[in-house]
Amino acid sequence: MLKVSIIGASGYAGAQLTALVHQHPVMQLKGLYVSASSADAGKLFTQVAGEYRHFPDLPLEPLCQSGCGALADSSDLVFLCTPHQFSHDVMPQLINKQAKIFDLSGAYRLPDLDTFAAFYGFANQHPSIQQKAVYGLAEWFADDIANTSLVAVPGCYPTASLTGLLPLQRTGLLDTAFRPVINAVSGVTGAGRKASLTTSFCEVSLQAYGVLSHRHTPEIESYLDHQVIFTPHLGNFKRGILATITAKLNPEVTANDVEQAFLRHYRHQPLVRLTSAFPKVDDVVNSPFADVHWQVDEQSHYVVIGCAIDNLLKGAASQAMQCANLAFDLPPTQGLLP
Ligand SMILES: NC(=O)C1=CN([C@@H]2O[C@H](COP(=O)(O)OP(=O)(O)OC[C@H]3O[C@@H](n4cnc5c(N)ncnc54)[C@H](OP(=O)(O)O)[C@@H]3O)[C@@H](O)[C@H]2O)C=CC1
Ligand SMILES: CC(=O)N[C@@H](CCC(=O)OP(=O)(O)O)C(=O)O
């Protein structure tokens, strides 16, 4: 059995990952961790995450940064479900040890360090670690993921946006003179478990935020190799993301070309479902799937693409597990599909 440690296990993404590891046939939970000063330190995971009350009793152990090296030496996998700054700071102690590291934060997703500093508000001090990190968009970078010991698991909006756009971009169907326009709505779990006024029950009402400034814009652009206009919205539902993307196609592109591009890239990908109608959030919530549909207007040469995912699963924990499966040469859907 592969020994797994999860740091940030009391958070929304960490609890999902804990559940996925628990049901994985060849992984076992070695330890669950929170910060040294956490109000949850010493509590049982089952006390903090009530939906998993039937799980075995595992404590949420307080973790000091100095204890991370030993953790990485005694685990096969370490998942970081922690804030960006913590993942950034702790990484030198985790890498080059026994464990492969899967970081769900944005700390090592952006190869351009100036862009990183501008969007994250702190500098990436570890360029040599950044060079080793592989972007964990599982359907697109499987070979690299299989051969690395550090995976930067993508953000939730970039997962939905890139899943919808990459088949067209990689096939050369997009008109490079126009930026695809991505409008995406996320449930409130996307903001994490920590209380804040903007995510409190009485305050949330469908609204755009981070307009022309969200840190997921450069993440999408880095891996699409194309500039975009990305507008996230916060919706008054718990989980799920719906991205609706409008893009300009080259003049000679037909509806059949677009269909072939999606089929070629996703026909053999079990976790991307090409649906017969525009996807619904409810169809993917609590599942590891990305649902994708599109419609082409051959007169105007525009395509509208819809992609729905569960932000906590395909947008975080289940994609991290897909990457872990790839990194350990296991079937990519192991522990994710019955
Ligand atoms: N929510 C989502 O949809 C997505 C989230 N992500 C990313 O995944 C990561 C986790 O997100 P999410 O679960 O939403 O966040 P939460 O705020 O819900 O959870 C954060 C977790 O990290 C722990 N933590 C915080 N500081 C430390 C520390 N210094 N040492 C150890 N543990 C610490 C927290 O526990 P405590 O503070 O009690 O110590 C908690 O368990 C973030 O980087 C986020 O950006 C990525 C994609 C989607
Ligand atoms: C609704 C909401 O607030 N969503 C988060 C994105 C969550 C995510 O993908 O996380 P990363 O921070 O790891 O990129 C946001 O907009 O900041």
Image (cartoon, rainbow, N blue to C red):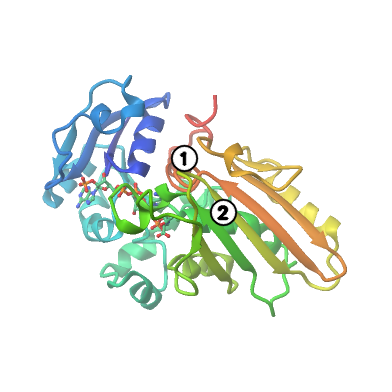
Q: CA distance from mark 1 to mark 2?
A: 14 Å
Compared to residue 242, the image places residue 71 above or below, namely above
Residue 1 in view here = no
Of residues 110 and 182, the one drawn nearer to the viewer in this rendering: 182
Residue that protrudes farthest toward the bottom in the picture? 177
Say whether mark 1 is within 8 Å of ligand 1.
no
Residue 131 placed where, x, y %?
38, 65
Residue plotted at (47% across, 41% down):
313
Q: Is residue 36 left or right of residue 92?
A: left
Number of marks present in the image shown: 2
Residue 109 placed where, x, y %?
41, 62
Residue 175 in view here = yes
Choose top left, top right, bottom left or bottom right for residue 24: top left
Residue plotted at (49% across, 62% down):
207
Q: Secondary structure at mark 1?
A: helix
Q: Which residue is mark 1?
A: 318
Q: Secondary structure at mark 2?
A: helix
Residue 15 placed where, x, y %?
34, 37
Compared to residue 91, the image places residue 215 above or below, namely below
Q: Is residue 302 left or right of residue 81?
A: right
Of residues 83 and 244, the one drawn nearer to the viewer in this rendering: 244
Q: Return the disc, 1 or 2, that comes first in the chain's sequence.
A: 2
Q: Which residue is mark 2?
A: 160
**For the residues bearing labels 1 and 2, Cβ distance under 8 angstroms:** no
Q: Is residue 299 left or right of residue 314?
A: right
What amino acid is found at the position of numbered circle 2 in the picture? Ala
Residue count near mark 1 (Cα–Cα under 10 Å), binned few <14, some 14–19, many ≥20: many
Compared to residue 123, the image places residue 287 above or below, namely above
Quadrant in the picture for the C terminus: top right
Of residues 191 and 90, the one drawn nearer to the viewer in this rendering: 191
Residue count near mark 2 (Cα–Cα under 10 Å), binned few <14, some 14–19, many ≥20: many
Say whether mark 2 is within 8 Å of ligand 2.
no
